[in-house]
Image (cartoon, helix red, strand yellow):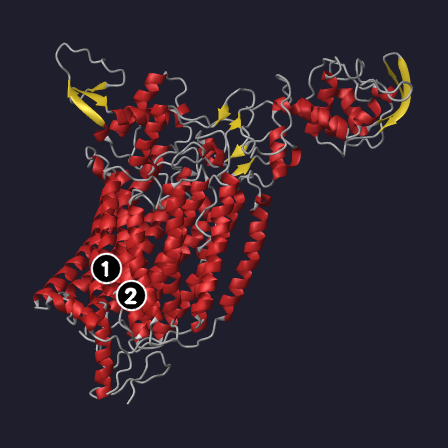
């Protein structure tokens, strides 16, 4: 009796209790156990940096309206805390969580155990080391001065070398897959895994190691930042959405064609956007980039339609699992952030919102909304599979969700409205600058409150993870067993 | 989309095209720019910064000043009569009208900056021409203004939301009999009766800020003539330009 | 009620990997994409500044930039000289401003050019001249082409300023507002001036 291979449309599950069901379950369990070491390490590191990053972000927001508070502390000056927070969240949390989810998805979709799990796990440790050195370097005043690449120059090679074993392991595992068909998530994961080393090494070489002269730095910096968001974080996030959403509602993803449309338009417009009108650059650069930024609306709409149709076709009328709530919240954040970002690229709107805190509204929505919620949903689903235990505090999951939703809503609204008002005031030469500051201040206070809510949610998440892992480790799962999975045959298609 | 090679080739081509368009070509256009001669003088622009101002730029970088302050002046338009009647160029835009600059910022203004920190948020005012915002004050007064602003922003800029950067300063008790003006760039805080002495980083930063001004005419960004000047025939006519200097 | 996939500790018996359906691409999305690509093309074409490295917003082209660079006050003489050459003045009045004896009157030392107020030479420039004219004791009887539709106020002012300052002449500059004023006053004049009639018009007008 053969196992029903996943990926076959309309496949029906074997009835519970049959030996093929046991075999199927055993295969999946083996796959999960095999990738435990690197994935749990990546998730743990990610959540640690999420908590640190959100705490630093909170400090930075508070300093914007309560400037006296930390005046004597160089390490907590606004100009150091803000990039430290950003780098912690993007390189520390989002990249690691994304890689962990990517590894697990590739194994599961291919029905094959992870190749080189030990190497990936060690690499994860080095990634954390690199981010740690980088964030401390920023706080100590050794920032490079380039937005998105603030970590001191020597951190770049560490991250790059830590990235390679993980990516190579993922690609080798992908190559060794039992299921040869490509699922939608595969495209996005391939895009992300391929894109990151190219943009990171280019930016690092041309901006940090042998810097180009003058305004060429502005162009390459903007190119890197946009590609990092749209072609590293977004594909990882969308791969997770397209994997977990159909899985959780137990329906197929609505449309393959919409997914193709999303993929190619994301790749096209994501690689060109990011430089806005008004920058001191020759106007052809900003013209091309603005057109591409507006084009980002198309993949966002396609994702919205695809996910909405999938969700509505699902069995549950309301989300019946916390992971699904997070995935849906993350997708909604992605769509809303996409609209706000496209609006900001549109010239009449941009003339008002340029250089204001409006950009932080959709930045918040992308990093703490889309990326964080999607990966949180993924972690909430994946970790029990790896540890074969439930979460230690299920109530905290709901608390995390509520805090995140309220924090995001408040923060986005406050920063968006504040940004528009700030922009209107800046554009009126009769308004003195201190009046502009006074106009923005209440919105920044509201945003600080929002980040506080987010921080509490992330601390709850970290606490939940720590408690779960400690309980799991104490439940006498000897260290040996973590690596035992390596010696089990990597399989699919076990007959019984 | 079931073939990995197809996806890989597609990704490679897209990345290559975007890399060519937004990395390589801008590098050709902008990365090879050189300083140009200032018309009517023997200087080149932009001139290299003096040593203390260069160190000040490093302090600016280390403390992330560009997260709140921009260094980019934008002109949103040209005066309406420019297109139709060859009137003298006049720039429109809130930045120009606020007095943050006489002309738009262009790539050549950033040639000597390493790294280029144009900023992306205006929590504080634009700093492109901050060095010439107080033209009536002597040099020492200007530097002192910047130092006092760093130490306690609301004391010199009413309603300022800028966080204080007191870690850039030392506070010393005034010794009895000591002249408080041993250091020209220090002052006494009247509330605490302590002498505030800037650290070398603060002095360097003040020199850097004082050096920031870019109101030099360029081919790609000519300075507007003062109002009322039309057919003024001072000096000999400058030669007609043939195009931007590469 | 199906088991909650998030709460189970191990893969359930019905845990399958996700699949993708073949729902259609919505027509409105395709239409939107096509509209977007068309718009993007038009937008880039309008705002690309001819892909030149020196064109920054708000300038739209290299021509704009050239105009901006020649319009500063101290460039008026150079502009006037260039127009004198390119708009055909040089062909008749010659590069040395001496004209051709018997045919075209000189500009150097001409009492018409050196008049304190430029009202008459602005009129000649705008509408041309036809008939006998006395310049420096010589009589000329020829036709001059009107420049009303060929030069803007600024350009006319520049050329007239140029002829009033070249070849040893030194008369006050001509302002574009003066030219505009005269242009307005003579807007119903459709024929070239007869110099004899022009002498009846006070030069301050």
Q: Judge whether C11 appears above or below C65 on screen.
A: below
Q: Are marks 1 and 2 in contact (CB under 8 Å)?
A: yes
Q: Is residue C74 left or right of residue A56?
A: right
Q: Judge whether C80 appears above or below A94 on screen.
A: above
* Secondary structure type for disc 2: helix
Q: Position of residue C171 (x, y in %)?
A: 72, 14
Q: Judge whether C102 appears above or below B161 on screen.
A: above
Q: Which residue is mark 2?
A: A103
Q: Position of residue A132 (x, y in %)?
A: 22, 48
Q: Residue at x 24, y 86 (%)?
A: A20
Q: Position of residue A434 (x, y in %)?
A: 34, 33
Mark 1 or mark 2: name the one nearer the start of the chain: 1
Q: Which quarter of the rendered picture does the N terminus of chain B lie within?
A: bottom left
Q: Position of residue A133 (x, y in %)?
A: 23, 45
Q: Which residue is mark 1?
A: A42
Do we see residue A409 in this rendering?
Answer: no
Q: Residue at x 19, y 35 (%)?
A: A73
* Secondary structure type for disc 1: helix
Number of residues whose C-alpha sits closer than 10 Å to that of mark 1, classed few (under 14), some (14–19) or many (20 or more):
many
Q: Chain of mark 2?
A: A
Q: Is residue A493 left or right of residue C123?
A: left
């Amino acid at each position: 009796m053969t196992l029903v291979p996943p990926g076959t449309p309309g496949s029906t599950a074997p009835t519970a209790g049959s030996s093929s069901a046991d075999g199927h379950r055993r295969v999946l369990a083996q796959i999960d156990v095999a990738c435990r070491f690197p994935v749990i390490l990546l998730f743990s590191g990610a959540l640690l940096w999420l908590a640190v990053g959100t705490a630093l972000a909170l400090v930075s927001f508070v300093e914007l309206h309560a400037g006296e508070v930390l005046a004597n502390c160089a390490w907590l000056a606004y100009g150091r805390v803000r990039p430290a927070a950003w780098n912690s969240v993007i390189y520390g949390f989002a990249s690691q969580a994304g890689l962990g989810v990517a590894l697990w998805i590739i194994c599961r979709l291919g029905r094959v155990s992870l190749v080189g799990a030990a190497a990936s796990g060690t690499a994860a440790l080095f990634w954390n080391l690199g981010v740690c050195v980088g964030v401390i370097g920023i706080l100590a005043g050794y920032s490079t001065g380039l937005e998105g690449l603030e970590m001191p120059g020597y951190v770049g090679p560490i991250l790059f070398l830590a990235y390679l074993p993980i990516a190579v392991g993922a690609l080798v595992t992908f190559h060794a897959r039992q299921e040869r068909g490509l699922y939608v998530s595969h495209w996005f994961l391939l895009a992300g895994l391929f894109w990151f080393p190219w943009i990171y090494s280019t930016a690092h070489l041309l901006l940090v190691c042998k810097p180009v002269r003058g305004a060429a730095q502005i162009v390459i910096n903007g190119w890197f930042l946009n590609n990092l968001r749209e072609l590293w974080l977004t594909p990882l996030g969308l791969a997770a959405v397209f994997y977990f959403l159909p899985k959780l509602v137990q329906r197929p993803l609505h449309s393959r064609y919409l997914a193709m449309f999303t993929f190619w338009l994301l790749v096209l417009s994501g690689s060109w956007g990011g430089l806005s009108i008004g920058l001191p650059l020759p106007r052809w650069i900003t013209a091309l980039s603005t057109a591409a930024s507006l084009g980002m609306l198309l993949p966002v709409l396609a994702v919205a339609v695809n996910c909405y149709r999938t969700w509505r076709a699902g069995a549950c009328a309301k989300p019946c699992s916390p992971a699904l709530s997070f995935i849906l919240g993350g997708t909604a954040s992605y769509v809303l952030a996409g609209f706000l970002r496209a609006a900001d690229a549109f010239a009449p709107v941009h003339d008002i919102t340029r250089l204001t805190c409006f950009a932080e509204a959709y930045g918040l929505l992308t990093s703490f909304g889309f990326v964080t919620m999607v990966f949180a949903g993924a972690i909430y689903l994946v970790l029990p599979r790896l540890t074969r235990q439930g979460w230690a505090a299920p109530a905290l999951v709901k608390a995390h969700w509520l805090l995140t939703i309220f924090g995001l809503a408040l923060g986005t609204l406050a920063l968006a409205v504040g940004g528009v008002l700030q922009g209107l005031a800046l554009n009126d030469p009769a308004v003195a600058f201190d009046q502009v500051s006074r106009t923005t201040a209440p919105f920044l206070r509201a945003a600080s409150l929002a980040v506080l809510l987010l921080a509490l949610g992330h601390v709850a998440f970290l606490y939940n993870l720590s408690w779960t892992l400690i309980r799991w480790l104490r439940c006498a799962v000897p260290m040996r067993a973590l690596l035992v999975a390596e010696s089990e045959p990597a399989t699919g298609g076990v007959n019984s | 989309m079931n073939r990995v090679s197809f996806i890989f080739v597609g990704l490679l081509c897209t990345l290559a095209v975007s890399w060519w368009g937004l990395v390589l070509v801008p590098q050709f256009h902008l990365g090879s720019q050189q300083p140009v001669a200032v018309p009517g003088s023997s200087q080149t622009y932009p001139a290299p910064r003096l040593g203390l101002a260069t160190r000040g730029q490093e302090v600016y970088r280390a403390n992330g000043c560009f997260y709140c302050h921009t260094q980019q002046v934008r002109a949103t338009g040209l005066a309406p009569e420019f297109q139709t009647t060859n009137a003298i160029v006049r720039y429109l835009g809130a930045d120009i009208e606020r007095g943050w600059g006489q002309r738009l910022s262009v790539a050549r203004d950033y040639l000597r900056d390493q790294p280029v920190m144009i900023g992306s948020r205006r929590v504080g005012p634009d700093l492109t021409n901050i060095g010439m915002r107080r033209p009536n004050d002597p040099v020492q007064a200007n530097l002192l203004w910047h130092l006092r602003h760093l130490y306690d922003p609301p004391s010199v800029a009413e309603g300022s939301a800028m966080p204080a950067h007191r870690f850039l300063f030392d506070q010393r008790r005034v010794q009895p009999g000591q002249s408080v003006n041993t250091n020209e760039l220090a002052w006494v805080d009247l509330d605490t009766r302590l002498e505030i002495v800037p650290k070398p980083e603060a002095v360097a930063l003040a020199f850097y800020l004082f050096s920031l001004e870019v109101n030099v005419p360029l081919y790609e960004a000519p300075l507007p003539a003062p109002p009322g000047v039309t057919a003024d025939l001072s000096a000999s006519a400058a030669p007609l330009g043939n195009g931007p200097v590469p | 009620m199906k088991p909650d996939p998030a709460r189970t500790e191990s893969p359930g018996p019905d845990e399958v990997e996700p699949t993708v359906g073949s729902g259609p691409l919505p027509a409105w999305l395709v239409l939107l994409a096509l509209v977007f690509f068309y718009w993007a093309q038009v937008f880039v074409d309008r705002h690309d500044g001819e892909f030149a490295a020196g064109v920054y917003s708000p300038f739209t082209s290299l021509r704009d930039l050239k105009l901006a660079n020649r319009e500063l006050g101290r460039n008026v003489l150079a502009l006037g000289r260039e127009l004198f050459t390119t708009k055909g003045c040089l062909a008749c009045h010659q590069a040395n401003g001496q004209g051709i004896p018997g045919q075209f009157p000189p500009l150097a030392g001409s009492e018409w050019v050196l008049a304190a107020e430029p009202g008459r030479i602005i009129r000649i420039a705008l509408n041309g001249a036809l008939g006998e004219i006395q310049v420096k004791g010589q009589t000329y009887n020829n036709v001059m082409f009107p420049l009303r539709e060929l030069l803007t106020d600024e350009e006319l002012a520049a050329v007239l300023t140029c002829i009033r300052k070249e070849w040893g002449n030194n008369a006050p500059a001509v302002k574009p507002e003066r030219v505009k004023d005269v242009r307005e006053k003579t807007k119903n004049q459709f024929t070239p001036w007869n110099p004899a009639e022009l002498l009846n018009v006070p030069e301050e007008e």
